[in-house]
Structures are given as C-alpha cells and as structure tokens.
Image (tube, helix red, strand yellow):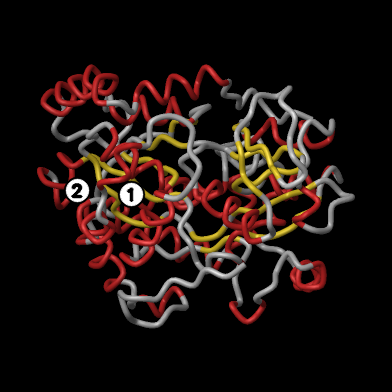
Amino acid sequence: MCLDDFTHTRRDFLKLSALLTAAGALPLLNSLQARAAAEPDAPVRIGYLPITDATPLLVAHNNGLFEAEGIKAERPVLLRSWAQVIEAFISGQVNVIHLLSPMTVWARYGSKVPAKVVAWNHVGGSGLTVAPGITDVKQLGGQSVAIPFWYSIHNVVVQQLLRDHGLQPVTKSANSPLAANEVNLLVLPPSDMPPALASKRIAGYIVAEPFNALAEDLKVGRVQRFTGDIWRNHACCVVFMHEHDLNDRPEWSQKVVNAIVKAQLWTRDNRAEAAKLLSRDGENRYTPHTQQVLSRVLSPSVGDREGYVTSGAIQHPTWDEQRIDFQPYPFPSYTEELVRRLKDTLIEGDKGFLASLDPQHIARDLVDDRFVKNSITAVGGLKAFGLSDSFERTEEFSI
C-alpha cells in the first residue's frame, strides 16, 4: 500500500525541530550567505514534496513559464520530508519552496530565518479522513487521529473541530489510556496514514491531498469533512522565498512570482491535464501518484460533489468550494487569524515565541505581497481567479 519511499520518521521531526531554532539554523544560514555571494544570479531551484500543494510550482516548470519570463529554472528537487525541505531552503540549495503556512511563522519567528511568504500556493486541498465505520466526529473519542505536523493548518482545524464536538485534543504516548472524550493526536508521514488507517492503528487522519483521495481509492477510509468547508478558502501551503532574493533581485523575484501566478490560472482551466502531468505517468513523473487518484482531487465529477454534500463532508455548499483551488493573493486577514489560532492550539515542543506575536504586525512582516499584486494585476486582477476584485476579505470559519 505504500506509494514510494516518501517517508519521514520521528527522527526527521526531531531534526526539523532542531533546525528551526536560532542555534540550529545558524550554520545553514551561514551556508546560505556564502551561496548567495558565490552565485548572485542563481536560477530558480524549487524544492517540493510530492503532494498536490506543489502543483503551481510543478506546472510552472513543466509548462516552461519561468523561461517564458526570461529566467532559468532547474528541474524541481523532490524531497522526502519537511525537514529536508527546510534544510535545503535555509542552506540555499533551493530558493523557491512550498511550505505549510503555520511553519513559515515558526521559521521566521522561532529561528529568525530571513525569508518571506510571497504568495499562496493553493487553497483548500485537505480533508479529515476516517475509518469507513465512522460517520460522526464524536465517534473519534477515545481514539487516535494523525496529523502531518504540529505547525500545520490541519492541526489548527482538527483541534477546533474536535472541541466543537465536545472532544479534547491530547498528546499521549501510544500505550496511555484515553478518556472517552479525548482524542490523541500523533504526527505521521502522509504516506503512512492510509496503511495506519487500514490496520486500525488510527481512527482517522487529516492531511493534504491526494492522501484523502487515496484512502477512498483503496477503500480504507472515507472523507468526513473537507478543511475548506470549515475555513473557507484557507491557505495550506504558501510560496516561501529568501529575503536576499526579494531585496537584491527584485526583477528576478517578480518573474518567479509571475510564472507561479500564471501556473495557477492555467491549472484552474486545465485541471484534468494538470492531474496527468503531476502523475507518475506524466512526462516528468513529478509524483508517485496515479492519474486516477489525482483526478479525484483536481477534477472531481459533479456526482462526487453531490455525494459529499449528502454525506456531510461538505456542509456549506453555498461556499462553492473546490476540493483544491488556486488563487495566489495572501490575504492579511488570514495571517492574522492564523496567528491568533496558533496561540490556542496544542503544539508539542517549544511554542513560547507565539505568545509575543502581534497578529497585525505578523501579517505585514511575514508577507511580502509587492510582487504578487503586480502579477495578479497583469493577468486581469483577482476576478481572473473567481474572486471579488479586493485585496481585503473577512475570514469565515464555521464548523
């Protein structure tokens, strides 16, 4: 059932925790400075995990959109864990990545990594998948649910979902007893989640696609709820770039963002083709996933949507959310709300730095939206992405 050797063990998570401290990041930051000085005109070097969150970056490469902007791009580097992504990025081996939006908060303010969010990579694209016999969130009481990482939108959303159903998120060792109203959260690699669900090691998991679609395809789980049906049009992964590129190479940075924005537009209009090019049958074999599984996410049928409304996986049909969608603008209201919610989210490890973060300041300091605003204007404004033509919005979070 395992798709590939896309694994990251607990050791990887401990490594990532060490990297994202001021002391752990220092040697890598020294390497970053040396690389930047030695190669001031470095080409686009993308680092990614084989999940649908990486779609715009991979489409931009596949379709030659970087070259069309007049800049060089190397073949994207497939990495096997968030620890590898962070290490490659901080050290300068790659210069454009997709990263879990809460992880960017940890990177910039927990370890002082000089990098900024320049755009959203996608919206939605995640779900809570449960064992076939579970039909109500309350049935997760006394059981374990897997998340991909503590600093993830998945962890933020699932904890609120559990609390609103009278359940208490906890983190306990595997052999510790659980009260009837407790749900034990544990971190698992996405590729380990379907096998763990099938073997009944866990009762459910919340993660990025296509691992929810994979459970459906393998008939080992069902989607209980899509995260985009809880937090409307939420960001999951965002585009993260080095500050020295943004400041020292503004024209290059603009062209990078131009290509990513155009890739998002193309994907919205060519969803079935995007599923094919991302699959293991595509020319570049970007991911180990089948076209069939990716199509469930990128170009689902009308019947699929109707089934999810009937089952309750979609409870806000008027929101008209896609299973995964693409729009690049990083709305400040989202970043503000994310910081507020992170403060009240159960997170293993040191989260002390969160207490002093001011949400409005973080929305201004973490994000550099100069380039993406230009790119959006050049393709016809936010209306080209099906949105009202305003760079402000109100967050909608509804269980």
Q: Could you say which disc has been placed on residue 66 in the image?
A: 1
| Three-letter amino acid code at the position of disc 1 | Phe
Which of the image's four quarters has the C terminus? Answer: bottom right
Q: Residues within 10 Å of mark 2 (few under 14, many from 20)?
A: many
Q: Residue at x 42, y 25 (%)?
A: 16
Q: Which residue is at the front of the view, 190 or 167?
A: 167
Give residue 64's position: percent from left, percent from top: 40, 49
- Does residue 266 appear left or right of residue 311 in this picture? left
- Does residue 276 appear left or right of residue 233 in this picture? right
Q: Which residue is at the front of the view, 249 or 276?
A: 249
Q: Which residue is at the front of the view, 269 or 363?
A: 363
The vertical placement of 92 against 107, above or below, is: above
Q: Residue at x 67, y 37 (%)?
A: 184
Q: Residues within 10 Å of mark 1 (few under 14, many from 20)?
A: many
Q: Could you say which disc has been placed on residue 235 in the image?
A: none
Which of the image's four quarters has the N terminus? Answer: top right
- Does residue 122 appear left or right of residue 389 in this picture? right
The vertical placement of 199 against 339, above or below, is: above
- Does residue 37 appear left or right of residue 24 in this picture? left
Between tags 2 and 1, which lies in front?
2
Residue 30 position by quadrant: top left
Q: Could you say which disc has been placed on residue 252 in the image?
A: 2
Q: Secondary structure at mark 1?
A: helix
Q: Residue at x 33, y 77 (%)?
A: 381
**Most distant residue in the front direction:** 179
